[in-house]
Image: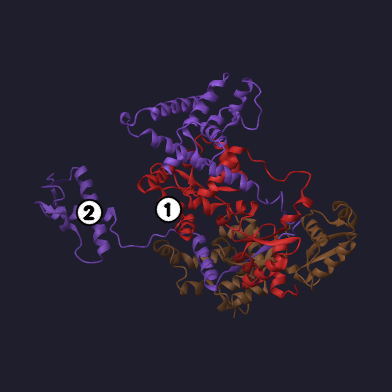
Chain colours: A brown, B red, C purple
Amino acid sequence: MTETPDELQRAVEATLFAAEEPMSAEALSQHLQGADVGPALSALEAHYRQRGIRLVERGKRWQFQTAPDLAHLLRREREQVRRLSRAATEVLAIVAYHEPVSRAEIEAIRGVQTSAGTLDVLMEAGWVRVAGRREVPGRPVIYATTPEFLSHFGLASRRDLPGIDELKAAGLLDPVDDAYDDLVTQSSPDAEDATEEGDELDAAALENPEQSA
Amino acid sequence: MTETPDELQRAVEATLFAAEEPMSAEALSQHLQGADVGPALSALEAHYRQRGIRLVERGKRWQFQTAPDLAHLLRREREQVRRLSRAATEVLAIVAYHEPVSRAEIEAIRGVQTSAGTLDVLMEAGWVRVAGRREVPGRPVIYATTPEFLSHFGLASRRDLPGIDELKAAGLLDPVDDAYDDLVTQSSPDAEDATEEGDELDAAALENPEQSA
Amino acid sequence: MIEDGLLFEPLAETGEDWNAPGTAPSGDAALYLELDGWEGPLDLLLDLARRQKVDLKAISILALVDQYISYIERAEALRLEIAADYLVMAAWLAYLKSALLLPKEEQEEPGPEELALRLQLRLQRLGAMREAASRLLARDRLGRDVFARGAPEGLRIDRKNDWQCDWYALVSSYAQLKARNEPVFHMVRERPVMTLDSALDRVSAMLGVRLDWMELREFLPRQGDLRLQRSALASSFVAALELARQGRAEIRQEEIFGPLHLRRVAA
């Protein structure tokens, strides 16, 4: 395709480029002192057919637009690696250990209010899903983990999550405050009985996976 | 001019066409998965040189715009360009040719106080920005031009400022004190030669006028 | 250049050719309005200089001074707040002119030639910037002469977050949560103690055996748990105080923190 555009083609090209709305051939012609813009439009349409932009006619009005095969360039996704916040990690852990669980239950376990955004983040990450509603007054939404959660954390099933005794054995309960932990450690046998009795069977089993296994 | 654009050229063309702001080569490259966009930009720039639209570089940023010789066809009824007062125009020129420059230095050249509004107008237009402070007593704020300034006035870089080389060579961008000292210490015919001897030197010094001052 | 720059001969034909910017002479009433149009005295001077129709390097400073002063004198309706700067310049120029006309040997530093040259340099610089400004404004300007695309589609970048969390963070977070929320039981360990009652019995029994002063420590058990010994010390001390209060014993201490002695009060 060899061409040096003539002056009318250049004028049409510039006018359509700068126009804020698509223009009909009549409007173009009027803008360009009544010139016959038909041939120029055809020549330009042909010229741009191979390029990254096209000259297209839509409902008798002409406009430039991105070539259809390049439309994806207009919308780019940029992935941003972000670490889960401590609050979100806690909520994820609670969902994982206690699922299905409502937001009120999560808050009861954490002892602090949990912003809706925290659960949104976990759902955006694809690790937590809405698992229905609990059939109690208010019918609260309940949350559970997803298969992506298991694969991300390399777990075959939720039963692979370490129980609280194993966490203790691994020293994971220690680092906070030695004096405080001393007390907790001494009182924990009783404490566990007290907190677990009302839990769902599932959660109780998780606390002591070796017993259920 | 025969050419079928390659895929990268098409992508660069489509991206710059769709962009709402001029884009640097780096931003383009980032948008196009790190492609080396330099050759594509050169090819496109050459392709569009004859056409009704141009691909131009303004302050390291690339943009499409209509060809200047078609201005008469495109002027709109409503003036899109802000009308500058004479004071604002002079201050803009002083900032552009002397940047970075403090308000006191602007006033020394103009011989009058510059109202705060004048610089505000130029900053609001997006043509002038605060470029830090000069490390002298009082640490005055210094001003410089922006990429939008270059874009608006069709300058590839500050070296394109009309007549800047001649002004520099004639010492007309140096403060009066320096110019006077030059005149007094050197015999006058030599003085002119001396200032003209190194155009490249002067151009380099333009980047940091305070060093040359 | 210095000699070229200062033509001390007033140019005859420049006298009447320098009215206000772009206005025909329309009487003195117009002049005060015209002062508003100048960007200060230097601007007015530059305009007057331009009207000499010579290169600024070859300007006649004396002619310029005359023109300026004459201009200011004719502007009768000067508004003072605008005119102050212009009047100061007029006074300075009048001084410059007289200095330039004086014999050289009577002049102070800086000499009038220097002042005149500096003024000329300033005018050149302002002139250069005025010229540059008009050339800048005459360029093909975006939005006036050249145009960006009227309706760009725009590039949208959707940010997607790739959330990171590892097994350890998950599990340790749960552990900490558990640790934090365990109900706290305050348990006092069973410890070997000597109660006050038994200390009272013990001390009064031993006082009954001995008549002279005894150190408190002699009342304490010699063996056993260190914690029991400490408890015994505390209890025995309180027991001694109690016996003294009851009038059954006396307490003596030679110095602060010294050993504590006690003995039975003979009834």
User: On the rendered structure, is A120 left or right of C47?
Assistant: right
Work out whether residue C98 or residue A71 is closer to the camera in this orientation and state it.
C98
Q: Crowding at label 1, few (<14), some or many (≥20) Cα neighbours within 10 Å?
A: few
Q: Chain of mark 1?
A: B
The numbered disc on residue C236 is 2
Question: At 47% from the left edge and 42% from the top edge, which residue is drawn?
Answer: B105
| Identity of the residue drawn at 88% across and 61% down | A58
Above-or-below relation of A103 to C141: below
Q: Chain of mark 2?
A: C
Q: Position of residue B99 (x, y in %)?
A: 50, 49
Work out whether disc 2 and disc 1 sit on a shared chain: no
Q: Position of residue C71 (x, y in %)?
A: 55, 25
**Closest to the observer: C160 or A212?**
C160
* Left or right of residue B192: residue A211: right
Q: Quickly name the residue at label 1.
A: B212
Label 2 SS? helix
Please determine whether, in this image, residue A70 is positioned above or below residue C30.
below
Q: Total of numbered circles in the picture?
A: 2
Dot 2 crowding, Cα within 10 Å, few <14, some 14–19, many 20+: many
Q: Secondary structure at mark 1?
A: helix
Q: Is residue A126 visible?
A: no
Dot 1 amino acid type: Ser
- Alpha carbons under labels 2 and 1: distance apart: 91 Å
**C67 left or right of B24 in image:** left
Please name the amino acid that badge 2 sits on.
Answer: Ser
State which quadrant residue C29 falls in: top right
* Relative image position of residue B27 (x, y in whole percent): 62, 64
The image position of residue C152, as x and y in percent, is 74, 58
